[in-house]
Amino acid sequence: MDKLVIATAHDGDIRVIGAVTTELVEEAVKIHNCAPTAAAALGRMLTAGSLMGSMLKSEKDALTLQISGGGKAGTVVVTAHSDAGVKGYIGNPSVDLPLNSKGKLDVGGAIGTEGKLTIIRDMGLKEPYVGQVNICTGEIGEDLACYFTYSEQTPSAVGLGVLVNPDSSIKAAGGFVIQMMPGADELLADMLNYRVQEIPSITEFIVKGMSITDILNYIFEDMNLKIACEMVPKYKCDCSRERVEKAFISIGRKDLEEIYSEGKTEELECHFCNKSYLFNHEQIGILLKSLD
């Protein structure tokens, strides 16, 4: 079962958020009918969103991750909330590249490196906080580590993994964010960085049947790991007819009048869950009257 945990280690010098997200990613891949490389890219972004969403302080806060590197995957967008719930989409769900030089799915090649990773935090203020970094590798985990280090000045290690079966179903997915707290010894950071580089990938642990708690206990052996909170990460789309109506109205009176005059039924689809919303001639007329 999917689970996310928030923990500390080494007497509070280290903060760690880790999660198994296999079921969440499987649901998203089915919704978007992703090919294997696209499944890995979207799955890593969704896992990252769930991890970062859990850091939000208020249930009203929202976090959006967007990566666009000029590759065949197009733009990948994920929105997350404090309950570790996420939704997302990939511009080209059919992208599927040959394996990279390491024999892995070529997420970096699909994303590309000519662009930005953007993090938008909406905390109910007049303007959301927007942080941006140049894409380092397109592999997403390394790019997020760069974001935390350079945009938020928080040295971090990020591990994200999605193991995809030949039929595009998800065999394993998960990830972690490990951050050094202010005042922590630099030698501790170096030791932890070495340890993270030497351990197997998170998907290898998951395939062996290890829970996220097992995995973190393995990584932080002898570091006094303390679990502070547990959540269940889920794929959740909060679209509604009311929201779609607002988006439809936002195209402007002129375009709405043009659609109305043609007398056709308009179909709008949610990017995140592919649910369709139909607006017939009469309903479009009602929307037009609401603008008066």
Image (spheres, helix red, strand yellow):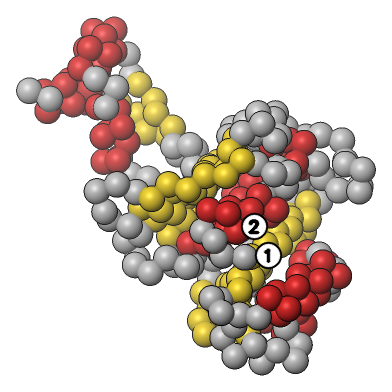
State the image coordinates of residue 202 (x, y, percent, origin top left). 76, 67
Name which quarter of the figure residue 262 lies in: top left
The residue where tag 1 is placed is 157
Front-most of 37 and 65? 65
Q: Position of residue 12 (x, y in %)?
A: 56, 86
What is the x, y in percent for residue 32?
Answer: 60, 40
Dot label at residue 145: 2
Relative image position of residue 285 (x, y in whole percent): 17, 20
Give the alpha-carbon distance from disc 1 to disc 2, as whole Å: 6 Å
Would you call the spot at circle 2 few (<14 residues within 10 Å), some (14-19), or many (20 or more)? many
Mark 1: few/some/many CA within 10 Å (<14, 14-19, 20+): many
The residue positioned 61% from the left and 40% from the top of the image is 134
Side of 172 where 204 appears, left or right: right
Tag 1: amino acid:
Ala
- Residue ID at (75%, 92%): 222
Residue placed most toward the observer, 289 or 17 = 17
> Which residue type carries mark 2?
Ala
Query: Is label 2 in a helix, a strand or a loop?
Result: helix
